[in-house]
Amino acid sequence: MSRLHIQEVGDTIVEVLIAIAVLSLILTAAFITANNSMKATRDAEEHGQAQALVTGQLEKVKQLATANPTGVFVSFPFCIDSTLAVIDLSNPANAAKCTLETDGITQAPNGFEPAYHLSVSQNANIFIATATWDSATGHGKANVSMAYRVYKN
């Protein structure tokens, strides 16, 4: 009797499992990198939006200091609304009036955009505007502060 030798061609199950494991590691690393990049981009966007809101508060301080210096030199923390009204933040009931979304509208946060809490404090003739919000990176609160010096006439 003659024997028939069939040469098997193909991959073994071990080779296939190793290939799947290597591919899984590569895809996991790519996902982690992309996710970290998206978080960093979102964090930069939030800081840029907060900086714009803080700059707006300081511009309003400048307007008020020019038009009505006594209206802006106050002893309590405050924010300034779109009508240039000074809102006293020492009263907790007013805090919601100084919580803005990215479009600058006073609203409750919608869950997608951060709610920026704005405040301006004063030390002599130096005004420090601050925006505070929950960071997209999940590391708690983030903030941006800017200072502006106003000279009394």
Image (cartoon, grey):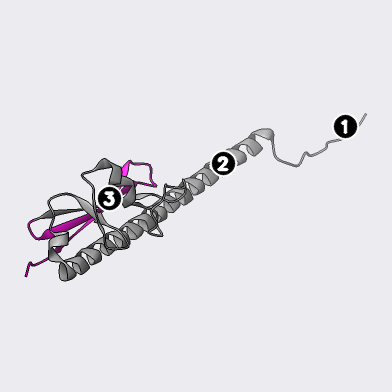
Mark nearer the N terminus (1 vs 3): 1
Image quarter of residue 6: top right
Q: What residue is drawn where x is 23% and y is 47%? A: 89
Q: Nearer the viewer, mark 1 or mark 2?
A: 2
Q: CA distance from mark 2 to mark 3?
A: 38 Å
Q: Quick one: quadrant of the N terminus?
A: top right
Q: Is residue 99 left or right of residue 60?
A: right
Is residue 127 covered in magenta?
yes
Near-viewer residue (76 or 140) = 76
Front one among 118 and 135? 118
Front residue of 144/102: it is 102
Q: Which residue is mark 3?
A: 143
Three-letter code, disc 1: Arg
Residue 137 among magenta residues: yes
Mark 2 or 3: in front is 3
Q: Which residue is mark 1?
A: 3
Q: What residue appears at the point 12 percent right and 58 percent down from the top-left corner?
A: 73
Q: Give the spatial CA distance, label 1 vs label 2.
A: 43 Å
Place of residue 99 in the rendered image (x, y in percent of width and height, measured from the top left):
34, 50
At which x and y percent is residue 112? 47, 49
Badge 3 marks a residue whose secondary structure is strand
Disc number lying in front (1 or 3): 3
Residue placed at 77% from the left, 38% from the top? 8
Amino acid of disc 2: Ser
Q: Is residue 142 left or right of residue 25?
A: left
Specify the principal SS of the magenta part.
strand
Residue at the disc numbered 2:
24
Q: Which residues are magenta?
A: 124-153
- Separation of residues labelled 1 and 3 (CA atoms): 80 Å
